[in-house]
Image (cartoon, coloured by chain):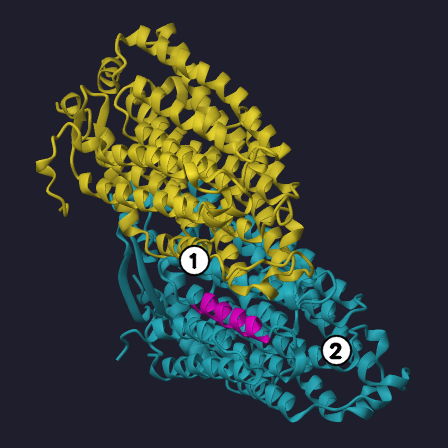
Amino acid sequence: MSPFNLAAINFVWLPILPLVVVAVAAMVVLLAGVRVDDSESEGLGLLTLASLAVAFVFTFGILGQYGVAFAGAISIDSFSAFFELVILIAAMFTVMMSLDYAADNRIPGAEYYSLLLFSVLGMMLMAAAGDLIVIFLGLETMSITVYVLAGIMRRNAKSNEAAIKYFLLGAFSTGFLLYGIALVYGATGTIKLGPIHDALATGAMGSNPLLLGGIGMMLIGFGFKVAAVPFHMWTPDVYEGAPTPVTAFMAVGVKLAAFAVFIRVFLVDFASVGAHWQTVLWVVAALTMTGGNLIAVVQTNIKRMLAYSAIAHAGYLLLGMAAGVRSGPAILYYLLGYAFTNLGAFSVVIALERRGEVGNRISDFRGLAARQPLLAGAMAVFLLSLTGVPPMAGFVGKLYIFSEALHQGYLGLVIIAVLNSVISAYYYFYVLVAMYMQEGGVEVERLNARPALVAAIGLAALATILIGVYPQPYIASAANAFHSASGAEGIHSAALEP
Amino acid sequence: MNGGLLTALIFLPLLGALFILMQREERAIWNSAFIFSLLPLALSFYVLAEFNPHAAEYQFAEQYDWIPAFGITYHIGIDGISLFLVLLTTILITLSLLYSGGGDIEERPREFCFFMLVLETGLLGALLSVDLFLFYVFWEVMLIPMYFLIGIWGHGRKVYAAIKFVLFTMFGSLLMLVAILYLVYQAHVHFNRTSFDLPLLYQVPLTVTEGRWLFAAFALAFAIKVPMWPVHTWLPDAHTNAPTAGSVILAGVMLKMGTYGFLRFAIPLFPTVAVEAIPLFMALAIIGIIYGALVAMMQPDLKRLIAYSSVSHLGFVMLGIFALNPEGVDGAIYQMLNHGVSTGGLFLLVGMLYLRRHTREISEFGGLWKRVPVYAAIFMVVMLSSIGLPGLNGFVGEFLIMLGAFLRIRLATVFAVVGVILGALYMLWTYERVMFGPITRAVNETISDLTGREIAVMVPVIALMLFMGLFPRPLISRIEPSVTAMLARANVAQALELERQPSRLAALSPARHTLNREPEMAAAAP
C-alpha cells in the first residue's frame, strides 16, 4: 500500500506524477544554477539526487495500479513502474558518480544536471508510453539531451567528437524509427499500442508490405538505440569520448529505456506477427554477441572495452527477444542485474580517472588490488557478474534468458551465446589479471574525499551480489512487471479476455 | 542430529575467509586460517563417525527452497561416493595452509588464505550438492580462487597458465550448463515440474539422440577437469606454474571433481549412453595412462613430471569408472583418494625442495640422500605409494581397477599394466637421479633437511598412505553401498549382462567380503 493519499490527486495526473516531479526539478535546477560556479556544482547535484529520490518514492506509490491515462497515451502498469524505478536508480547512481567528477572537470553544473533530469524524463516517458507518438516523444527527449551530455566537456576534442557522432547517427536512426511508426500507422490505422496489438492479433494483416516495412524500420531504430550489430558503430567512440558518468548513464539508462519500448512494442504488440521479425532478431542477436565480444578482446581502453561489452550484453538480451514473449521476464531480470553491474563498473573507472585520460587504460588498473583492495574487490565482483560467474546477478540473468530461449527451441543461438561467454571471460579476466597479478598502474586520488562515489560502488556491489544470491523476489517482480504489460491486468486487458 | 551439519561444513571456511579479511597482522592471518581449516576438518571427521556405512542414500540431507521460480532448491547430502572426497578436501586444505605458512607464501598472505578458504567452500559445496544448479554454482565458484592462486602466487608464466585454466574449464562447463538447462526442460515436459533436483532428473526419459548429446556435453566438461587425453593440455601449465598449495589442491581435489562428476552426474543421468561409450572412454583412459607416463618420463622439471603422472593416474581412475562394475568403480574412488594423498604429498615435497634451491630441474640435483636423509626417506614412501607398492594405498586402488577393467574388457588390462610398469619406471628413475649418485652441484652440499613444521605436514600424509594401504576395508565398505546403488539405479547391471566370476574374484580381492556381498545387493535393488 502506498503511504500517500493518492485518491486526493486527480487520477489523470497521478500516473505521471513522478514525471512531473522530474520535469519541475529539471527546471528548478537550471534556474538555481544560474549563479553557481562550475567548480561548486555539488549543491545542484544533491538537489538533483533529492528530486530523483522523490520521484522514486512516487513511482513506488503508483506501483500496483493498472489502467491507461490521457486517452491511452500513457500506460499505467507494473511494467512501466519497473522500468521507471530502475531508470531512476540508474540516474541516482549517475548523480552520485558525477558530484565530484563534474566539479573537477568544470562541467557546467546547472546545464549538466538539468539535462540529466530531462533525459530521465524522456526515458520514463518511454517506459510509460501507451502509443507510438509518445514513444517517439520520449525517445527524442532522451536522445537530444544525451547528445548534449556526451559533448558537455566543450574543450575536450573527444567529447565533441562523441557528441557529433552520436547526434548524426542518432538523428539518422530516429528517422528510420519515425518512418517505421508512420508505416505501422498506415497498415493498422492506429498509433495506440493496444489497438495495434488487437489489429495484428486478428491475423487479417498477414504479410502486409506496409506493416513489414514498418516493423523493419522500427527494428533498425531500436537496434541503433540498444547498440545492436550492425547498428553499433557509434558506441565505442561515444562511450570513450563522453564524460564517464554520462557513459555509465548511456550504457544503463538509455539501454533500459530503449529495451522498455522495444519489449513493449515487439514482444507484446508485435507478438502475433513474431514470425516476421524473430528470425531477423536471431541473426542480429548472434552478430551482436559475437561482434561485441570479439572486438572487446583487443581493446586497451577500459571505456571502449565496456562499450563493446555493452554491445555483447545487448546481444544476450536480443537472444531473449528473438525467443519471443516467454522470455520477457528473463529480459527484465537481466536488465536489472546488468544495470547495477555496469553502474558499479563505471563507478570504479571514475574512481581511477583523473583529469584528461589517465586511468582509462586497462593497464592503469595494474596493481590496484595491492593499493586499494576494496576497490579492486568491487571491480572483481562487477567483472565476474559481467562474465556470468555465479553467484553474481549476471549469472542468474544469463541462466534465465538461456533457459527460456531453450524452452522455445533456440538451442543453436544458446550455444552461440555460451561460446561467446567463454570469449568474454578472456577480456573480463584480463582486467582481473591487471588488478591482481601485475604491478604499476595509477594511484587512486582522494577516494576518502568522495563519499558519494564510494557509496555508489559499495551499493552497486552489494546489489550485484544480492540479486544473484537471492534472486527470487527480483524474478517475481520482473515476471509480474512483464505480465502486467502482456497479460490480463495490463493495457490490453480488454483485448485479451476471451 | 544432523540439522545444518553439512551447511556448517560448507560455509565455515567462507566465514573464516571473511574473518581473515579483517586481520592485519601476518601471524594472526596464518593462525586464524589454520584454525578455520581445522573446524571443517573436525566436522568432516564427525560426519565420518556418524555416517551409516550400510546406507546407500544421501545422509545428513538438507533441502530448502532457494529460487522457487526455477524449482531450484538448496539440497545437500553426503553418501559413500562423496564421503571420503570431503575428508580428503578438508585434510589437504589444512595441510596446505600449514605448509604455506612456513615460508612458502610470503607475499599477500591475507588474500592467499582468503582464496584458499573460499576454494574449500567451493570444493565442499560441489561435492555435497544434490541439486544440479547448486552444483553448477559451486563448480564455477571454485574456479575463481584457483585462478587467483595460480595467477598471483604462481611462478613463471603464471598469468598465461591461469587464463588457460579458466578458459578451458569454462568452455566445458558452459556447454554443460546448456545441457543442464535442456535436461531440466525435458523434466518440465515429462513431469510438468521444473526442478534441478538430481533424484528427479535421474528419471527423465530421453530419446537416444538427446541422451547422446547431453552426455557428450556433461562428459566434455568433466573430461576437461579430469583431465582426459586429449583435453589435458591446460594441466601441465597450471601445475608447473601454480604455487605448491595450489598444485596440491588442484591435483589432490580439483581433478577429482571431474571424475566425481562422471560418477554422480554423467553416468547415472545417461546410463545407456554411458554403456555405449565404454569402449571409447576406456580407450581414451588407456591412451591417457600410457601417454601420461611416457611424457612424464621425459620431463626435466619435477613438477611437470608429477603433472603428467597425474594424467596417467587419472587415466586409471577413468578406466575403473568406465568398467561400470562395483570392482572398477570402488577402485576408481579409492584411486581418487590415493592420488590425492600421494600426488598431494609429492607436490608438497617438490615445493620443499624448491624453497631450498629455487629450481625444480631434475638435473640440478643428485646425491641428496646423504644430505637430507629424512626428506629422502619420506620422498621414498610417497613415491612408492604413487607407484602402487603393495602395503601402501596406491596398490589397492590400482588392483581393484585392473580387476574391474578385466571383467569388462580384458585387453584393456593388458595396456593398463604397461602403464603401471612405466609408472614404476619413471618414478624410480627420477628418484635415482635426484637422490642417489654423487653430489654434482656444490649448493646441494649445504642443503638443509626438513624443518619440524614440514615433518608435521608430511606425517599425516604418510600415515594415511599406510592406513589406506593396510586397511582398505573400512573405506571400501562405506563406499560400496552407494556405488552399488548408483550402478543399480543406472540399470547398468541389467543393461550389460555382466560376466560375473565371483569365485575367482574372492581368491584375489583384498576386499573380498564386500565383493561377495555385491551381487545380492545388485539383485535386491529395484
Q: Colour of chain A?
A: yellow
Q: Give the letter of the cyan chain.
A: B
Of residues A51 and A220, the one drawn nearer to the viewer in this rendering: A51
Q: Quadrant of residue A238?
A: top right
Using the image, determine if residue A404 lies above or below residue A182: below
Q: Is residue B359 magenta?
A: no
Of residues B348 and A372, the one drawn nearer to the viewer in this rendering: A372
- State left or right for residue B418 relative to residue A32: right
Task: Specify the segment rendered in magenta.
Answer: B109-124
Q: Quadrant of residue B19?
A: bottom left
Which labelled disc corresponds to residue A458?
A: 1
Q: Which residue is mark 2?
A: B354
How far across and down, in percent of the image, does residue B281 sit?
A: 57, 54
Task: Check the residue under mark 1 and report the chain it is in.
Answer: A
How far apart are labels 1 and 2 at the CA level? 41 Å
Q: Is residue B220 visible?
A: no
Q: Is residue B117 magenta?
A: yes
Using the image, determine if residue A389 lies above or below residue B32: above
Of residues B397 and B467, the one drawn nearer to the viewer in this rendering: B467
Examine the residues drawn in magenta and state their main secondary structure: helix
Mark 2, secondary structure of its residue: helix
Residue at the spot x=46%, y=80% of the render?
B36
Mark 1 residue type:
Gly
- State left or right for residue B257 relative to residue B308: left
Which labelled disc corresponds to residue A224?
A: none
Task: Check the residue under mark 2 and report the chain it is in.
Answer: B
In this view, the mark in front (1 or 2): 1
Viewport quadrant of the C terminus of chain A: top left
Residue at mark 1 shares a chain with residue at mark 2: no
Mark 2 residue type:
Tyr
